[in-house]
């Protein structure tokens, strides 16, 4: 489906608006598609609106790009009214075969002849539930995952009567909705993902049943380890890495025999004969696409860093452990707040701040978005101020420095996971003013990323006016200025925006 041309459906009908139908509604409406809803429950509209609110919030946190104008939602009094004039019908009624057979048959009579009709069923076969439909060649299963408005996977499975063109058109529509259509090659119960999920779930239930682990312990076993890895590479690519340079065949030789041991309740294991091993090794090679183990390990680690730092931002799961490590490391080093002015290195800028580019700092161009530069620069200023005795206690006492002017030069790109180092020069000061110059560089190769020049004024915060700084603060500034006296003015200091002059004002008509 690589060359697919994605195109949104003109209009969509949803039959059933519970957990899944509501999620479909949110994804469609947010993508700008008009939706007609049929659900006999009086609470259906509220479910949709609640999911839409969640979807708006989630997507506004995921990307700074505003979504297109939302589609319009209409409530239909009948199946026929809902499906009139639509290009996509998505059925998400309860998982009961008889109910779906009747619902889909009625929808197929009333829907336009060229509409794609899809079912969200988690495991029923399309041939069975489409048995009473007219023109079943336009019917398929499109199995999504909750929350539908965020998770991209949609498994597409055709039945005996499904036309290949139906699968291709459906893939194009779901692709345009920002989803990842995965074609299920054979019509099977449970498709691909639910078979995997069910295998894990089956084992989890046995572990609880046998008193081996509690529900929380089983969830921890997933979310602190394998679950994080799964989110980046699935199962097979991760195991290829576990095999090291010797690859998949070595991994299978090492761990394959263990499948015969009764570790799990799922002991029905396919025979690891040469045919299966050759198939597996060939598929693993294809999946690796020529990348070395070193390259794959770097991709895995970078993706894990992205997931872990996302979780750290939420103070959740494995992110809590990352934050704890970070705090331990911070305590173990002489943090910026504890730099003694006596330790100032004469003739060198101050190394005050170090940070790592978080994944949520990245914009649609794939590198650090503009306002994050200011955030890093402002954090550096916040490390400078305690150094001169103008930290938290000083602010509580009613004095502070306010930034009144900033000039940022963007010199290089920073990507998720890059470690940034910031150094600081005190370019000038007097009793009320402070002129700082920060320089951000990438830690790995020293590439300049940005500079920031900032003018700060010393204020009496209660009175709201500038006043001279305290004597201790001024003395500390003198010492820093003295230590940096030998440094030449940094490149780019004192710059304003250059370039094309503003056009001359138009003459005022008489
Ligand atoms: N919940 C999940 O995680 C999940 C994931 C993927 C797929 N699915 C599948 O999606 C489908 C819906 O599941 P759900 O979890 O949203 O169920 P749900 O019970 O939350 O919602 C079902 C909705 O269908 C409505 N309904 C009942 N009879 C109807 C009819 N005749 N016509 C139209 N609507 C009718 C109900 O009022 C309800 O609002 C099922 O086939 C399920 O297997 C569920």
Image: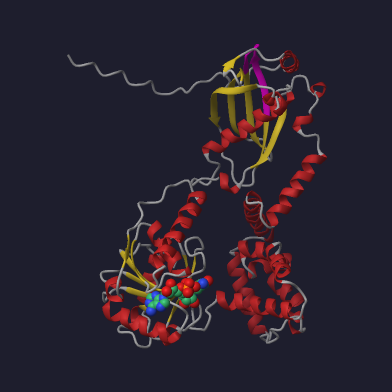
Ligand 1 appears in which quadrant?
A: bottom left
Q: Quadrant of residue 211?
A: bottom right
Q: Which residues are magenta?
A: 423-434
- Residue placed at 49% from the left, 45% from the top? 365
Image quarter hosting the N terminus: bottom left
In this picture, residue 259 sits left or right of residue 93: right
* Percent x, y of residue 457: 60, 18
- Residue placed at 60% from the left, 21% from the top? 462
- Residue placed at 57% from the left, 19% from the top? 464
Image quarter hosting the C terminus: top left
* Percent x, y of residue 329: 78, 43
- Residue placed at 69% from the left, 84% from the top? 266
Verify whether residue 22 appears in magenta: no
In this picture, residue 309 sits left or right of residue 192: right
In this picture, residue 153 sits left or right of residue 314: left
* Percent x, y of residue 205: 68, 78
In the image, farthest residue toward the front: 42
* Percent x, y of residue 490: 63, 21
Q: Residue 140: in sight, yes or no?
A: no
Query: As displayed, is residue 446 above or below residue 457?
Result: below
Query: As displayed, is residue 343 above or below residue 133?
Result: above
Image colouring = secondary structure
The secondary structure that most of the magenta stretch takes on is strand
Verify whether residue 424 appears in magenta: yes
> Camera-side residue: 446 or 381?
381
């Amino acid at each position: 489906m690589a060359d697919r041309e994605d195109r949104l459906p003109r209009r969509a009908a949803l039959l059933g608006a519970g957990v899944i139908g509501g999620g479909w509604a949110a994804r469609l409406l947010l993508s700008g598609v008009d939706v007609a809803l049929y659900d006999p429950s009086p609470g259906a509209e509220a479910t949709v609106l609640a999911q839409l609110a969640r979807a708006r919030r989630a997507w506004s946190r995921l990307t700074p790009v505003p979504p297109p104008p939302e589609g319009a939602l209409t409530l239909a009094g009948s199946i026929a009214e809902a499906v009139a004039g639509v290009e996509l019908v998505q059925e998400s009624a309860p998982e009961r075969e008889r109910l779906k057979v009747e619902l889909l048959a009625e929808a197929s009579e009333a829907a336009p002849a060229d509409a794609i009709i899809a079912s969200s069923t988690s495991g029923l076969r399309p041939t069975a539930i489409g048995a009473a439909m007219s023109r079943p060649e336009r019917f398929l299963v499109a199995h999504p995952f909750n929350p539908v408005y965020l998770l991209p996977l949609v498994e597409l499975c055709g039945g005996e009567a499904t036309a290949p063109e139906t699968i291709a058109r459906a893939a194009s529509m779901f692709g345009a909705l920002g989803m990842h259509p995965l074609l299920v090659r054979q019509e099977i119960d449970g498709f691909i993902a639910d078979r995997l999920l069910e295998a894990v779930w089956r084992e989890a239930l046995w572990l609880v049943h046998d008193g081996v682990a509690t529900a929380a312990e089983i969830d921890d076993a997933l979310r602190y380890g394998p679950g994080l890895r799964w989110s980046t590479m699935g199962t097979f690519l991760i195991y290829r890495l576990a095999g090291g340079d010797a690859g998949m065949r070595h991994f299978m030789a090492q761990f394959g025999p263990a499948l015969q041991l009764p570790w799990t309740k799922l002991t029905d294991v396919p025979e690891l004969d040469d045919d299966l091993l050759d198939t597996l090794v060939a598929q693993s090679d294809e999946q690796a696409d020529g990348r070395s183990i070193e390259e794959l390990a770097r991709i895995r680690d970078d993706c894990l860093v992205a997931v872990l730092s996302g979780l750290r931002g939420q103070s959740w799961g494995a992110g809590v452990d990352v934050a704890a490590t970070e705090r331990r490391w911070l305590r173990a080093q002489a943090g910026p707040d504890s730099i003694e002015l006596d330790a100032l290195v004469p003739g060198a800028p101050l190394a005050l701040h170090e940070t790592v580019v978080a994944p949520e700092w990245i914009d649609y161009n794939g590198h650090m978005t503009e306002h994050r530069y200011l955030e890093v620069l402002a954090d550096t200023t916040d490390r400078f101020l305690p150094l001169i005795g103008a930290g938290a206690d000083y602010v509580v006492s009613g004095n502070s420095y306010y930034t009144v002017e900033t000039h940022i030069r963007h010199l290089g790109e920073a990507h998720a996971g890059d470690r940034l180092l910031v150094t600081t020069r005190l370019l000038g000061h007097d009793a009320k003013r402070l002129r700082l110059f920060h320089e951000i560089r990438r830690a790995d190769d020293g590439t300049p990323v940005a500079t920031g020049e900032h003018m700060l004024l010393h204020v009496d915060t209660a009175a709201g006016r500038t006043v001279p700084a305290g004597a201790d603060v001024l003395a500390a500034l003198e010492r820093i200025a003295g230590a940096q006296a030998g440094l030449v003015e940094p490149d780019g200091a004192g710059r304003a925006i250059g370039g094309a002059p503003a056009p001359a004002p138009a003459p005022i008509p008489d």
